[in-house]
Image: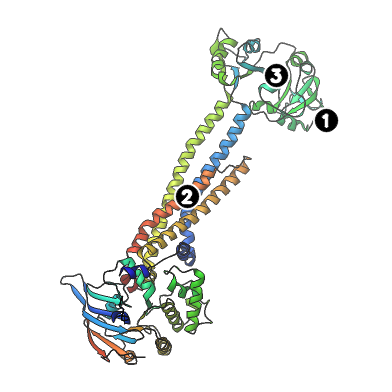
């Protein structure tokens, strides 16, 4: 008998397990499509959420990198009874004495309008603000020029202006090659440079920046007190510097000086979006679970419907294990197809949304791999019970009802 | 194992000794009562009886789809009485071919692939299975229908595909359960003719039927009634070829 058992053994090749498992999917296409959809939606939601949050985080990181995390911004707080919001005139000088400070620069708004010609009324400012800044501003802010040159010690004292990116657009100035001039207040200023968008101080994009000396000489005729001071520190020293800045700038009433870190706002935005990411991931997981239950349901129905096929296969020599593997494979293939569709869908959603926002498209590899693996796992779990049921079916009973 | 040549058991395609099958119940239902039967290689025989006579139970036990409560079942000399479910599957894949009343062809598969399924659980490669399947289909006269699906074929053609599937693994015994039950008399006659031809080539074929007229046309008849063998005609188990 042992000889016979060894001679007459049922065998099913691994490639045939796959073929047999795919058969039910090929012959019932609509049902396959619909039950795949459940898992696909769940996976697409999760991949989409991961992709979008990764893309937006990448965008934030880019902006934070552009800002630098070692930048501090100082301005006069809303002190009691203080109308003008300016800092003490020697504030920049005082800050520069703090050891770990690597760069300091101040700006102040100048009450004047910018016009292309003197034919335009002085009352129309076109939404452009005139700033008086010192020559260090460009390096302190990590800003860069689209065209021309920045103010230097010489041009700071003369009627020369550098335009912010939006301001240049509004004035219709593309580059500095034409040696154009604009009218600021009562005088003509030569346009010597145009800035790229400035991440650290977005107000500068709508600004026309002139030297402090030039502002005093040509526009206000009086001393200009700094309104806002930007401070770059050594990397480790930011907190220490932040603590000593207000008393340094205004020893009498340090509480009236506000020191903020622009990158903190972006980091907070990042943290907020992370909270939403976990929420949506949870929703995606619920959708995936529902999809898995759908697959289990479809597989249970398939086992009931295909009793005679199970009986036939047992008659042809299939073992219980062969039947179990067939239905398990079918469930895994169903869910796996849903996973592949879901990952592509999620990646496509990410790509479309990110490109409308002009973000770099980032779909984390872990979301792609994890999405497919999660779908396969869901399929295996969903197929476990129906497959066991199919295998348990006695061949005589399976062959009876047809 | 026998130096004087094959033993008596090994010369038989099928041997049943005192086979009893009881189903659980109060009192237990005895579907087969002490059935003994010998079928030699190359026989064509009918197991005939009215419904409820136990012939379906007998078919299941001969086909190793079910195990007897007691008694011995030998297929081609192999005692299957004590085998595990997995071992019985192995016996079916190697020694037995089934033909069913309602064909049991898989929709969405060509005739060749349906017949190739007869070798699926033998672990042969797809190419080998298809080659053997095409040969078997040509043998049953369906050489022109290789790539047709069951829905594109008539009932008689479908049953011939099923017969090709039953012989593709060169079994020791072919069990045909009411093979003409779903067919009109003309295609039924053609299917019977095909089974007779296969018998003439030396195959062992058992036809299970309630049709006494059909049974009468076969060389040997085993009549069943109430779970027992009523008569075996002719009594002598001579070579019927």
Q: Is residue A363 left or right of residue B66?
A: right
Asked whether the residues under marks 2 and 3 belong to the same chain, the reply is yes
Q: Which mark is residue A177?
A: 1
Quickly name the residue at label 2: A373
Cα separation, mark 3 vs mark 1, equals 24 Å
Where residue A143 sits in the image (x, y, percent)? 68, 26
Image depth: mark 2 or mark 3 in front? 2
Percent position of residue A304, x then y: 36, 66
- Work out how far the residue at label 2 is from the one at label 3, CA to CA, in angstroms: 54 Å
Residue at coordinates 69% horizontally, 28% vertically from top-left?
A: A206
Q: How is the image coloured?
A: rainbow
Name, please, the residue furthest toward the left.
B27
**Between discs 2 and 3, the one toward the N terminus:** 3
Q: Work out whether B17 lies above or below A217.
A: below
Query: Label 2 lies in what chain?
Result: A
Asked whether, in this view, residue B122 is left or right of residue B222, the answer is right
Please say if B231 is above or below B89. Answer: below
Q: Closest to the observer: B31 or A253?
A: B31
Residue matched to label 3: A136
Few, some or many C-alpha atoms within 10 Å of disc 3 (few <14, some 14-19, many ≥20)? some
Q: CA separation, marks 1 and 2?
A: 58 Å
Helix, strand or loop at label 2? It is helix
């Amino acid at each position: 008998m042992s000889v016979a058992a060894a001679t007459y053994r049922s065998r099913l090749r691994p490639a045939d397990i796959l073929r047999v498992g795919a058969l039910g999917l090929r012959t019932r296409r609509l049902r396959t499509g619909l039950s795949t959809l459940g898992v696909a939606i769940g996976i697409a939601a999760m991949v989409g959420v991961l992709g979008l949050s990764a893309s937006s985080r990448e965008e934030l990181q880019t902006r934070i990198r552009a800002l630098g995390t070692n930048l501090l911004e100082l301005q006069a707080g809303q002190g009691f009874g203080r109308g003008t919001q300016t800092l003490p005139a020697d504030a920049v000088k005082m800050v520069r004495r703090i050891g770990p400070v690597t760069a300091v620069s101040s700006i102040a708004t100048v009450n004047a309008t910018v016009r292309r010609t003197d034919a335009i009324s002085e009352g129309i400012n076109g939404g452009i603000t005139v700033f008086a800044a010192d020559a260090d501003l460009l390096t302190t802010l990590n800003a860069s020029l689209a065209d021309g040159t920045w103010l230097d010690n010489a041009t700071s004292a003369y009627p020369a202006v550098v335009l912010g990116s939006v301001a240049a657009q509004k004035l219709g100035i593309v580059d500095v090659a034409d040696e154009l001039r604009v009218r600021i207040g009562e005088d003509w200023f030569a346009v010597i440079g145009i800035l790229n968008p400035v991440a650290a101080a977005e107000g500068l994009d709508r600004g026309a920046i002139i030297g402090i000396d030039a502002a005093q000489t040509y526009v206000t005729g009086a001393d200009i007190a700094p309104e806002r001071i930007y401070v770059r520190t050594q990397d480790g020293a930011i907190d220490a510097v932040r603590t000593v800045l207000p008393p340094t700038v205004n020893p009498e009433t340090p509480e009236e000086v506000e020191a903020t870190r622009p990158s903190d706002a972006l980091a907070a935005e990042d943290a907020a979006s992370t909270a939403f990411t976990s929420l949506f991931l949870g929703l995606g997981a619920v959708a995936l679970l529902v999809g898995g239950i759908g697959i289990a349901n479809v597989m249970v129905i398939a086992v009931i419907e295909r009793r005679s096929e199970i009986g036939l296969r047992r008659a042809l020599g299939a073992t219980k294990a062969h039947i179990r593997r067939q239905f398990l494979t079918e469930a895994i293939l169903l869910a796996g197809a849903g996973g592949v569709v879901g990952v592509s869908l999620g990646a496509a959603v990410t790509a479309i949304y990110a490109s409308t926002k002009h973000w770099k498209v980032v779909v984390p590899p872990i979301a792609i791999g994890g999405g497919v693996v999660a779908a396969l796992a869901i399929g295996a779990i969903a197929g476990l019970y129906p497959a066991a049921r199919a295998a348990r079916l006695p061949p005589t009973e399976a062959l009876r009802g047809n | 194992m026998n130096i004087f040549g094959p033993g008596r058991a090994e010369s038989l395609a099928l041997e049943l000794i005192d086979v009893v099958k009881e189903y659980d119940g109060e009192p237990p239902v005895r579907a087969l009562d002490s059935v003994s039967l010998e079928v030699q290689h190359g026989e064509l025989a009918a197991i005939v009886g009215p419904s409820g006579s136990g012939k379906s139970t007998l078919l299941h036990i001969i086909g190793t789809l079910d195990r007897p409560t007691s008694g011995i079942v030998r297929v081609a000399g192999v005692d299957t009485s004590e085998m595990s479910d997995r071992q019985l599957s192995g016996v079916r894949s190697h020694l037995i071919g089934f033909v069913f009343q309602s064909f049991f062809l898989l929709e969405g598969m060509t005739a060749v692939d349906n017949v190739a399924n007869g070798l699926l659980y033998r672990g042969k490669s797809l190419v080998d299975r298809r080659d053997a399947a095409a040969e078997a289909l040509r043998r049953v006269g369906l050489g022109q229908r290789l790539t047709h699906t069951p829905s594109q074929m008539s009932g008689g053609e479908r049953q011939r595909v099923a017969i090709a599937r039953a012989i593709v693994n060169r079994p020791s015994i072919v069990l045909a359960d009411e093979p003409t039950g779903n067919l009109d008399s003309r295609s039924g006659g053609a299917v019977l003719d095909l089974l007779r031809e296969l018998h003439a080539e030396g195959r062992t074929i058992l036809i299970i039927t309630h049709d006494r007229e059909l049974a009468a046309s076969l060389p040997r008849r085993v009549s069943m009634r109430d779970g027992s063998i009523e008569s075996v005609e002719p009594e002598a188990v001579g070579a019927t070829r």
